Each structure stands twice: as C-alpha cells, then as structure tokens.
Image: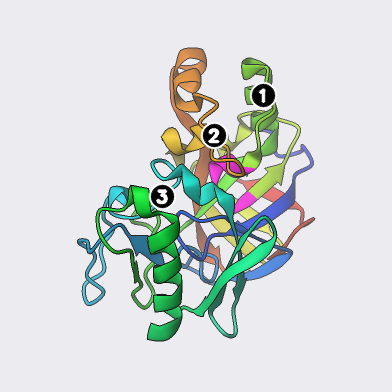
Amino acid sequence: MSTSDPMSVSELCRYPMKGLAPQLLDHCELTPGETIPFDRAWAIENGRGRFNPADPQTIPKINFLMLMRNERLAALDIDFNDKEQSLTLLRDGRSVVKGALNTPLGRQLIEQFMGSFMEKDLRGAPHIVQAEGHSFSDVSEKCLHIVNLASLRELERALNKEIDPLRFRANIYIETESPWVEFDWIDTQLKIGEACLEVYARTERCAATNVDPHTGERDMAIPAMLMRTYDHQDFGVYAKVTKGGVIKTGDTVTATP
C-alpha cells in the first residue's frame, strides 16, 4: 500500500431518505460508532412491511422503495434541513412537497405524494419509517461508504463510458492517484480532518449501480462488468468512525496501517 500518494476528500454525501437522491455537504461532524448525521435515517416502506421501530433490525431493502427496482425515484431531488428535520422533494428544480419528518403530518404529506408519484410500483400505501439511532443501510454496521475516484476512472476506461460517481451512493468520494488502493485499506486507519475511520470491508455492488441516478435509465451493467473484468463485484469500501470530529471537502486523507 502506498501512503505517499496525495489523497483528499472530493465530495461528501448523505441520504436522509433511503432510496432517494443524495444531499451534498461541504462539511459534517462525525461521532465514533455512528454514520454521518441523518444518513439513511428514514425509509419508505412499499406497503406496510416488516420494520418494527420498537425493535429496529436491518431487513432486506426489497421492503422499501429503492433505486434498484424503483428507478422513477431518480426523477426526484431532495433538500433536507437538519434543524427542522424537514424534507423537500423537487422535480425539475421545483418543489413538489415538503414535510417535517419528525411529525405525523409532515410524513403524511410526503407519503401522499409518493402514493401518487410511485403508484405503479406500489404493493400498498407507502409508509415512512424511522427508529431512534437506526440507519437504513444495506449493512448492519453503522459505517460510512467510501469510493476512490481513481478506481472510477479505471472503470470508465474498461466500459469506455463516463460514469456518474453518484451511482455508487457513497458518503465520501476520495481523490487519489492510485486505482484500487482502497482495497489495501482494509484493517487500516484513515485520518480525515479531525476524524479517524477504520476500513473493514469491501463493498459488493448490486444492480442499483446500473441505474442512471438522474434519468432513471438502466443503461449499464456494472456488477456484471466488474465480474467479467476483475473477477469480483466489489467497488468501494466500508469504514467505521473510531475518532470523531469535523471533516470537510478538500481535507487531506492519510492511511496508516
């Protein structure tokens, strides 16, 4: 593993509502053992589902509206206000609904809109769910997802196409000069700004990456291409916060075995 290559944070993202568009951040404060604040804090059940707020568990994402199967979601952008815990959904730059997710009325407003907007995909009335301290990640551990943009450029060369990095729904996009170096970070500590993160696993990709995050078009076959070219379907890594603090775009990233 090379630790001398310059590395820095290119973008920070969070996804307040699982399955919907990201919110780009210029900074955030991390807490040990937690995700980025409000990352995947809410989800929309496709009809009444299996999630129990009194006993929150990680359950298969098929229970929720998600980009992998419900590509129409790509037509919506979001804006989230931390203080109000309000979510605004936008289409073509115009607000279509706004609701405070910490209130029954606010959730109902968004549920009613999604009931109409996603009507053809629904198995029942959409239902927003949440539990204190729970994150609707696809993995049980509270973590951040990291993507190396040098690896993305290698993937673009292999496919001979431009690839929007938002297809990978990462929290931290890191600019490096070394493709695939992130796989050498397993069991390594990354120092970013005031915080430290321990990288613990590679990210196995699913068919959600085949969907253009802006148009909803299924125009690529990224997991299949990864398997065909590299004999695996991994792209990106998961990391747990071990030391809290503020991180921001432009921060230098250092890896320590």
Q: Is residue 90 above or below residue 173?
A: below
Q: Which residues are magenta?
A: 166-172
In space, the residues marked 2 and 3 are separated at their CA atoms by 14 Å
Residue 245 visible somewhere in the drawing: no
Residue closer to the observer: 169 or 10: 169
Helix, strand or loop at mark 2: loop
Badge 3 element: loop
Determine whether, in the image, residue 127 is placed left or right of residue 54.
right
Q: Which residue in the protein does label 3 denote?
A: 66
Q: Residue at x 76, y 32 (%)?
A: 177
Question: Residue 77 or 39: which is nearer the viewer?
Answer: 77
Callout 1 amino acid:
Glu
Task: Check residue 156 in the rendering and tell me which mark sits there, or answer none.
Answer: 1
Residue, x 59% and y 79% (percent of image)? 82
The tag on residue 255 is: none
Q: Position of residue 247 (x, y in %)?
A: 69, 64
Which image quarter holds the C terminus? top right
| Residue 156 seen from this side | yes
In the rendered view, does 139 fall on the left or right side of 181?
left
**Residue farthest along the top direction in this orientation:** 228
How far apart are labels 1 and 2 at the CA level?
18 Å
Q: Which residue is mark 2?
A: 217
Neighbor class of circle 2 (other Cα within 10 Å; few <14, some 14-19, many 20+) is few
Q: Is residue 51 magenta?
A: no
* Foreground residue among 68 and 30: 68
Residue 133 picture location, percent across and down: 39, 74
How far apart are labels 3 and 1 at the CA level?
A: 25 Å
Residue 89 in picture, x, y percent from top left = 57, 65
- Nearer the observer, disc 1 or disc 2? 2
Q: Position of residue 93 (x, y in %)?
A: 70, 59
